[in-house]
Amino acid sequence: MTSSMLQSSFMQESTRMARAHGPVFTREFFHLRFTFVTGADLVAELADDRRFGKHMKPVLESFRPMFGDGLLTADDHEPAWRTAHDLLVPAFSQTAMRGYHALMLDVCRQLLDSWGATAGAVDVKDAMGKVTLEVIGRAGFGYSFDSFERSTPHPFATALEDAISHGQRLITRPPMAGGYLGRRAAQRHETDLAYLRAVVDEVIARRTGHEHGGDLLGLMLDSDVLDPVNIRNQVLTFLAAGHETTSAAMSFALYYLAAEPGIAERARAEVIALAGTAEPEFDQVAKFRYLRRVVDESLRLWPVAPGYSRTAKQDTVLGGRYPMRAGEPYFVLVPALHREASWGPDAERFDPDRFLPERVRARPPHSYKPFGSGLRACIGRQFALHQIVLVMARVLQRYDLTLPPDYRLRVSEGIAFGPIGLTLYPVVR
Ligand code: MNH
């Protein structure tokens, strides 16, 4: 793997610095400039879509060559954003979600079968990556990557990760001196991109000429509002955005469940009380309140996307104190927001009960932002949460989780935050 922009600890360092330097401070990473915002009151202001919009700098710009005018990397003012957003929102409605439940259960079954009775040491990143690639492939596009028939991740997952890392490296480092390594990396990148596009074309071609249906691909093929290039951009965007973030979120949640047996036991007792050891029904998943708090708390400490950029539409003053020029990017550093004063002095501690309704109400409304803000917030949020809670429930129903005794959580900053080198020992109960 190529080393990426965020494969340092820049975001984690910045998060530690926020305590002394917040709520607004600037840092440079190679020749990228980040102006971080970490205070809940300021983040609340930035959420106002009349005064502020999304910005591609300093991070998302590096994704644009890959994802074009797909939903994630389209500018607010590009017509492609609104058109695709309005078209695709129904694929994430409650009714649509209900329709994905059976295939999510099916993928859970594949995961549990692959672990069997004696899983031994399990590579958590690979296992969760298989789950989320299967779920988004099948739910969005009726396409299976046959991830569980493979011993290693599908080459699509690897190529995606490498291509994004390469893009990030290009925008952080001065252009490489054109030497042999630079040329090799550029050639590899071209090969990765060609392969990713070939897979996308195959996903689309499988469906062309068949009945389309109400999933993401069906909605796009049935309407005539998106051009073919935009449809390809959306397919790649959803396969990427739907996969890596969600699997990292699952990995962190599994880490905390394994590290805190008392919490895992409480979550398991709730699942068993409501669903026994059977596959949970769609409506039961929303009733796993404690397990959902575990997931929320896990996304608080490690909100797998480090943040999102906002920009003022006109020159303005943020919080009555910070002059903002129109068009300048401000980066909401979410892990710092998630540790700011309103979370209390023990903000580093993992405590799911922070998400009890009365405690949520006692905090400022914009102090929790793992899915971004306003119009440009994550479209896949409910889809991700349903899937994560369901997978955690199925794992808890079947297994006790044990960490290697010497494991200490260290976090990588690749495409998303992720626990480095996490293995678990699932033991059938
Ligand atoms: Mn998701 C936007 C986080 C799962 C598809 N996502 C965002 C943003 C954040 C985010 C933050 C806003 C980025 C920005 O403002 O620059 N997303 C997550 C997290 C998870 C996640 C933490 C899982 C956990 N996302 C998913 C899933 C899908 C998805 C699953 C698809 C099925 N996300 C998107 C898309 C966008 C997005 C598409 C861009 C939406 C838009 O701008 O219209």
Image (tube, rainbow, N blue to C red):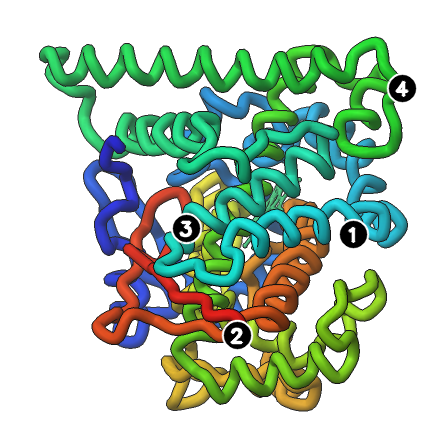
Check whether the beta carbons of the residues at disc 2 and disc 1 lie within 8 A of each other. Answer: no
What is the CA distance from the residue labelled 4 to the residue labelled 2?
41 Å
Say whether disc 2 or disc 1 marks the residue closer to the N-terminus.
1
**Type of amino acid under label 2:** Glu
Q: How many marks?
A: 4
Which residue position holds label 2?
297
Closer to the chain start, of discs 1 and 4, is: 1
**Cα distance in 3D space between marks 1 and 4:** 21 Å
- What residue appears at the point 50 percent right and 58 percent down from the top-left corner? 249
169 left or right, relative to 303: left
Q: Quadrant of the N terminus?
A: top left
Residue 273: percent from the left, percent from the top? 75, 84
Residue 278 lies in what quarter of the image? bottom right
The residue under label 4 is 211
Q: Nearer the viewer, mark 4 or mark 2?
A: 4
Amino acid of disc 1: His
Task: Identify residue type, mark 3.
Answer: Lys
Q: Is residue 329 visible?
A: yes
The disc, 4 or 2, on the residue closer to the chain's N-terminal end is 4
Secondary structure beneath label 4: loop
Q: Is residue 426 above or below residue 74?
A: below
Asked if residue 296 is positioned above or below residue 228 in the image, the reply reads below
Task: Classify mark 2: helix, strand or loop.
Answer: helix
Residue positioned 51% across, 62% down in the render? 117
First in sequence: mark 1 vs mark 3: 1
Figure check: 109 above or below 410: above
Q: Circle 3 is placed at which residue position?
A: 125
Q: Is residue 294 left or right of residue 383?
A: left
